[in-house]
Amino acid sequence: MNQIIAKPAESESIRKRYRDNSCRHLLGTAHYLQTRVMNTLKTQCGHKHLRLGFTPYISLIGERGRRLTDIAEVLGISRQACNQAVKPIESAGYIARKADQTDGRAKTLYLTPAGVKLRSDGTRIVTELDREFAAIVGNDAIADTSKTLGKIYHHLALGPAQERVPRPPEVGMGALLPALADYILHRLMELTRDKGHRRLQLRFGQVLTLIGPSGGRIQQIATIHDVSKQAISVIATELEEQGYLQRNPDPTDARQIVLNFTPRGNQLIADSVLSVEELEHEFAAIVGQAALKRMNITLRQLYLGLQLEPDVFEKHNSSDIGHLAHQLQQELGPQGSRALARLLLTPSVNTR
């Protein structure tokens, strides 16, 4: 691996590029979308025992059902792995197995009535989120970005085989983001591993991407990802063992620990930035530099407009009004936030 010895100014430039790039903006927006969809399905639509991993299987089964082997082939996994993945979906009551009409030895997966409702509710929520995105950046920007994302989606053959037609799918941005985010994660991991980081794993990104100039705190990272503190601590320990991170006392709270990058961790950041640039060149070859630039501008506006990860690269504390506002926006959603704003702006009436 060619080591990059960065000067202070160059190091700051790398850090800035690391925390402000199109891949991060797309991944952050996709994570926001998936989290909102899951929360809405659970809390407002009554769907229980959901996992994000259910999404590709529910989508691929479709109205007429689909054989397990066909789903495994589309997803690029073994039949055994596919069978294990669909078992919890079956246990949750969203799919069922029936004997295949053309091959008695095979099984076809069908959506149950609960599965049909889940897919319908999910589609409706994603459409609503597309409108929320358009309220931030404008309808024209969303339409243009959807078109560009669709070209990339089609070129990379990310959808089911029957979708691979000579033109990109005419679907909304929200429907394209999850598959593209998954591709970006895997491709960036592949490119960065090729630079000498052979033991990197996808789940490491949960921690690595959320460590800012002042470090990262395990509880903060766990809260952003909506996972347990223990799960993040396990990943942090593995990264520490591989020499990427070190634990230091929190200068603002002696009871807490801060995760900081080691010199090897800083090298990883530099290599990650190079990987992002390589991937952007690959996308530019597909859609053209002008279209890619417009898409990147829209994704950045969305990322900033949704206030994704504001407390990672800016210094906040629990009493800061900006941090509190971000938490309320995440919990209340756009309609609830507007209702709260109207309430706060309404002069109080003394009833005594």
Image (spheres, rainbow, N blue to C red):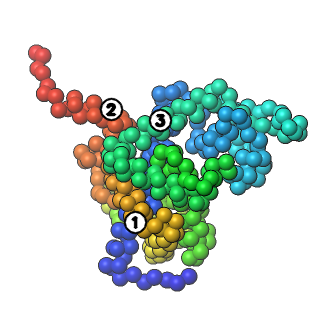
Which mark identifies residue 290? 1
Helix, strand or loop for disc 3: helix
User: Which of label 1 and label 2 is nearer to you?
Assistant: 1
Of labels 2 and 3, earlier in sequence is: 3
Helix, strand or loop for disc 1: helix
Q: Determine the image quadrant of residue 110.
A: top right
Of labels 1 and 2, earlier in sequence is: 1
Which residue lies at the image location 51% right of the left edge and 45% below the top edge? Answer: 171
Residue that lies at the very extreme toward the right in this rendered image: 104
State the residue position of label 2. Answer: 336
Q: Position of residue 321 (x, y in %)?
A: 24, 45
Compare residues 146 and 167 and report the one nearer the observer. Answer: 167
State the residue position of label 3. Answer: 125
Give the Cα separation between the discs numbered 3 and 1: 31 Å
Q: Determine the image quadrant of residue 20.
A: bottom left
Three-letter amino acid code at the position of disc 2: Gly
Circle 2: is it few (<14), some (14-19), or many (20+) Cα within 10 Å?
some
Q: Position of residue 153 (x, y in %)?
A: 55, 56
Circle 3: is it few (<14), some (14-19), or many (20+) Cα within 10 Å?
some
Which quarter of the figure is the C terminus placed in? top left
Helix, strand or loop for disc 2: helix
Q: From this view, report whether residue 47 is shown above or below residue 286.
A: above
